[in-house]
């Protein structure tokens, strides 16, 4: 059996790594890695392959940026050519990025089976490109690997049959535990953030890149004003995504003096930072889940989340972009008056093994 494992953008790399490791432990299934090239900067892509120990991609589509249609189209035509000359039996897509959508459509139209890892998540907010990607991918997938119970409920409501659904837990959390173990044995003094960590016994970590937060001046200015107030009490460090950096420059936004901006960080350097943070302020889907897994307080600068278990069981709260709500939550965290949370079911480091078992059967 031949499987294609698709990765394109930064959050995909940590999700395919544990699946590749689990495939490496068996010999019934051959797999190839396809990098769509959706993310292309060294620090948005290559560094993850190196650190996460993923083999070099068997195919690189070099799609690059562009509008959604341009990027999706480039990935689709590149991926179709590969499937024509080296047809797989199954295509595994992960997450909700444009590469996930593009490759699942191509495979399905070529009558190749599609498995979606992280299926069933719904924000019910169609202004998010990721929600459209999730819905379309799930509407045509054959096998669904689900990270939390709400994902099962959503897919059943959408008419999927129970035997297609597999509640396996979360491959990204597999990767988190695996890398955390590796981090304990690593020399972290060469990380670019070591000096910041040494000089700031308490700090918060910020990540922001959602178009709804960073693409309009009004929204980005208001978020930075709130961050500046927080940083008077708690210094902040902000590894900044290229989308956000471009918009900050376009809108002439200067961060406050207690907000340290850095280039996007490698997985290990970032993990070493947030695992010891007092809190995370973010609009990332992945960080909401990872902070829940390690019990770090997380304030999500969004009005909704497709990952509700991080709120109902974890350490995450949705604070929107309201200054008042963000600052109230911030005060609670600083007063050590925050929920401790618990690690959700099956977020135990074995999700990828479960996925490979299902595929083997
Ligand atoms: C994409 C995903 C989003 C994911 C995010 C993680 C979609 C619809 N969105 O959004 O779900 O959370 O990745 O980062 O798939 N850029 C660079 N270098 C790079 C990559 C991007 O400079 O290596 C620039 C692009 O030119 C563009 C901007 O960053 O101007 C945004 O990149 P893009 O891939 O369009 O979307 P993301 O915002 O990264």
Image (tube, rainbow, N blue to C red):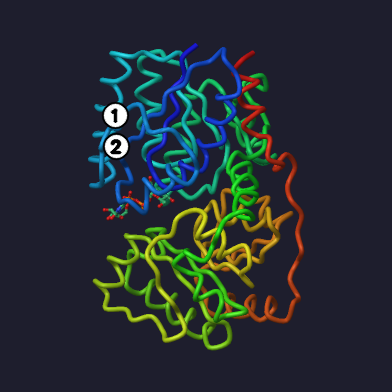
Residue 235 in the figure: left or right of residue 335:
left
Percent of width and height locating residue 226: 49, 80
The residue located at (62%, 79%) in the rendering is: 201
Q: Which residue is mark 2?
A: 72
Near mark 2 (Cα within 10 A), the count class, few <14, some 14-19 or many ≥20, is: many
Front-most of 306 and 17? 17
Percent of width and height locating residue 128: 42, 50
**SS label for mark 1:** helix
User: Which quadrant of the view contains residue 34?
Assistant: top left
User: Which quadrant of the view contains residue 109?
Assistant: top left
Question: Is residue 265 positioned above or below 338 on the image?
Answer: above
The residue located at (51%, 60%) in the rendering is: 270
Percent of width and height locating residue 155: 60, 32
Asked if the residue at tag 1 contacts the one at tag 2, i.e. Cβ–Cβ closer than 8 Å, the answer is yes
**SS label for mark 2:** helix
The residue located at (44%, 75%) in the rendering is: 223
User: Which quadrant of the view contains residue 197?
Assistant: bottom right
Q: Which residue is mark 1?
A: 76
Percent of width and height locating residue 84: 29, 14
């Amino acid at each position: 059996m031949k499987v294609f494992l698709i990765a394109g953008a930064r959050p995909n790399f940590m999700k395919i790594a544990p699946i590749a490791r689990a495939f490496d432990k068996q010999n019934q299934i051959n797999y190839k890695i396809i990098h769509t090239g959706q993310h292309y900067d060294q620090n948005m892509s290559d560094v993850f392959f190196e650190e996460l120990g993923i083999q070099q991609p068997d195919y690189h589509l070099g799609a690059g940026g562009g509008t959604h249609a341009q990027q999706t189209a480039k990935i689709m035509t590149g991926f179709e050519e590969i499937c024509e000359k080296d047809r797989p039996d199954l295509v595994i897509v992960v997450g909700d990025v444009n590469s996930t959508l593009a490759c699942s459509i191509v495979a399905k139209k070529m009558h190749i089976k599609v498995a979606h890892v992280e299926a069933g998540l719904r924000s019910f907010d169609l202004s998010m490109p990721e929600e459209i990607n999730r819905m379309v991918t799930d509407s045509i997938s054959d096998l669904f690997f689900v990270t939390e119970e709400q994902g099962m409920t959503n897919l059943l409501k959408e008419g999927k049959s129970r035997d297609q659904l597999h509640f396996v837990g979360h491959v990204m959390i597999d990767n988190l535990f695996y890398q955390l173990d590796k981090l304990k044995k690593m020399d972290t003094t060469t990380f670019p953030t070591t000096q910041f960590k040494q000089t700031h016994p308490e700090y918060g970590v910020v990540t922001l890149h959602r178009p709804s937060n960073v693409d309009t001046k009004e929204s980005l200015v208001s978020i930075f004003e709130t961050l500046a107030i927080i940083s008077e009490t708690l210094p902040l460090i902000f590894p900044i995504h290229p989308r956000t950096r471009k918009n900050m420059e376009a809108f002439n936004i200067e961060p406050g003096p207690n907000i340290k901006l850095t280039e996007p960080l490698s997985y290990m350097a970032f993990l070493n930072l947030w695992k010891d943070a007092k809190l995370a302020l973010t609009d990332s889907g992945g960080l909401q889940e990872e902070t829940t897994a390690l019990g770090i307080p997380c304030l999500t600068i969004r009005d909704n989340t497709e990952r509700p278990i991080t709120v109902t069981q974890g350490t995450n709260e949705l604070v929107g972009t309201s200054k008042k709500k963000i600052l109230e939550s911030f005060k609670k965290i600083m007063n050590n008056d925050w929920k401790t949370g618990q690690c959700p079911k099956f977020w135990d480091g074995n999700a990828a093994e479960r996925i490979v078992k299902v595929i083997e059967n």
